[in-house]
Amino acid sequence: MSTPIVDWVIDVDTHVTEPPSLFTERLPAKFRDQAPHTRKDPDTGLEVWVVGESNVIAPLGHTAVAGWKDPFPAAPASFDEVPLASHDAKARLDYMDSLAIWAMAVYPNVGGFGSQAFLGLKDPELMLACVRAYNDFLTDWCGTDARRLIPITAVPFWDVAESVKEIERCAEAGHRGVLFSGEPQSHGMPVLADPHWNPLWECAQSQGLPVSFHIGAGNFAGEAFWTPERLTHYGPGAVNGMFTTGLFLDNGKQIADLLFSGILPRFPELKFISVESGVGFLPFLLEACDHTFEYGQVRKQRPEFTMRPSEYFARQVYGCYFFEEHAPLSLLDRVPVENLLFETDYPHPVCLYGNVREKIDASLAKAAPDVRRKLLFENAAALYHVEAPDRAPTLA
């Protein structure tokens, strides 16, 4: 039996389970009665997040099911039951050490994976205050060890000018990425290609911050899947499988949108990351984009394009994988190894947990050492400016 390789890893997609007091404590006093908050659902007994007067976002425990005793959708009933490492930064660092994970990028839950949940508050001033409160919380949380915990800035995307201000403010505070919806049109906003967004792209580029399209940041549409009819005929596990797989593929559509939008030619130093969507579909996606690009004679219609979509992808776009065992190595003749990143999605329902190192070894057992280092550490270290570890890794 071969000895497992122990190497430091950078995990580019994890989430923090926000404490129930986050907004009630951090919002200006005039907004605290309207703050997102948790309450006990009288029908289920679960602690749920509420944004607005009655808009229930999700049970709090669904954000942190890693290691839970029963399969999803079973989950902790309250904040008191979720794993300590889901919300306590020191416990998170201990968890990381146990797996030789040097750094983690950190994403939200309550505001949605693109701040879209705050739209339910209706009041732009309150919406902005919530984004700022979350970002301040994240700055403090990641400040527990700013070398290893990587804060990703949420933006008030409904207001480009305020988004620019928030990116600049958070960059100064040490944030190292920007979270943005890959399909803003699903929230009544202009499409990606619209010049409306240019100030935001220019700001992110000037700050050297990559932009993340996290799955579920567009039209989440969970109600279309989690219906009584589907639950009766499919069961909750199959419904969750359909829903989650659809979210992965939605990000594929967003990558295609990005590649044809003209953003990449206009902002050649700006990087984009498709987060939590997997990478196995990328060869087909890029080949399809290149084929339709040439067939449609896009160069004649759009002179800003001097390369094919796959070439812009290679220059500026990254994909993230976690559960895939076949794709990371099998697609390297079509997707540059420098464009691939590793994640776990801890502590979400489909995350890697209890099998992180096993999955790494299953996918990279035949990888050359330099390929392994790029996929697990070097690509992410360059993207997020992560300092070299100060000690050798060990496994608990």
Image (cartoon, grey):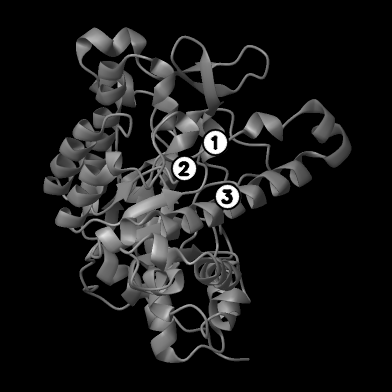
Q: Residue at x 14, y 43 (%)?
A: 168
Q: Which residue is mark 2?
A: 183
Q: Disc 3 marks which amino acid?
A: Asp
Q: Which residue is mark 3?
A: 250
Q: Position of residue 176 (x, y in %)?
A: 24, 54
- Marks 2 and 3: CB-CB under 8 Å? yes
Left or right: residue 356 versus residue 222 is: left
Q: Disc 2 marks which amino acid?
A: Glu
Could one spot residue 117 in this view of the protein? yes
Q: Position of residue 84 (x, y in %)?
A: 44, 43
Q: Residue at x 84, y 29 (%)?
A: 229
Mark 1 / mark 3, whichever is N-terminal: 1
Left or right: residue 303 versus residue 64 is: left
Is 51 situated above or below 308? Answer: above
Q: In front: 307, or 388? A: 307
- Alpha carbon separation for disc pair 1 and 3: 9 Å
Tag of residue 67: none
- Marks 2 and 1: CB-CB under 8 Å? yes
Q: Which residue is mark 1?
A: 219
Question: What crowding class fits label 2: few (fewer than 14 Cα within 10 Å), some (14-19), or many (20 or more)?
Answer: many
Could one spot residue 7 in this view of the protein? no
Q: Quadrant of residue 311?
A: bottom left
Left or right: residue 358 versus residue 36 is: right
Mark 2 / mark 1, whichever is N-terminal: 2
- Alpha carbon separation for disc pair 2 and 1: 8 Å
Q: Disc 1 marks which amino acid?
A: Asn
Instruction: Tell me the quadrant of the picture where the C terminus can be found.
Output: bottom left
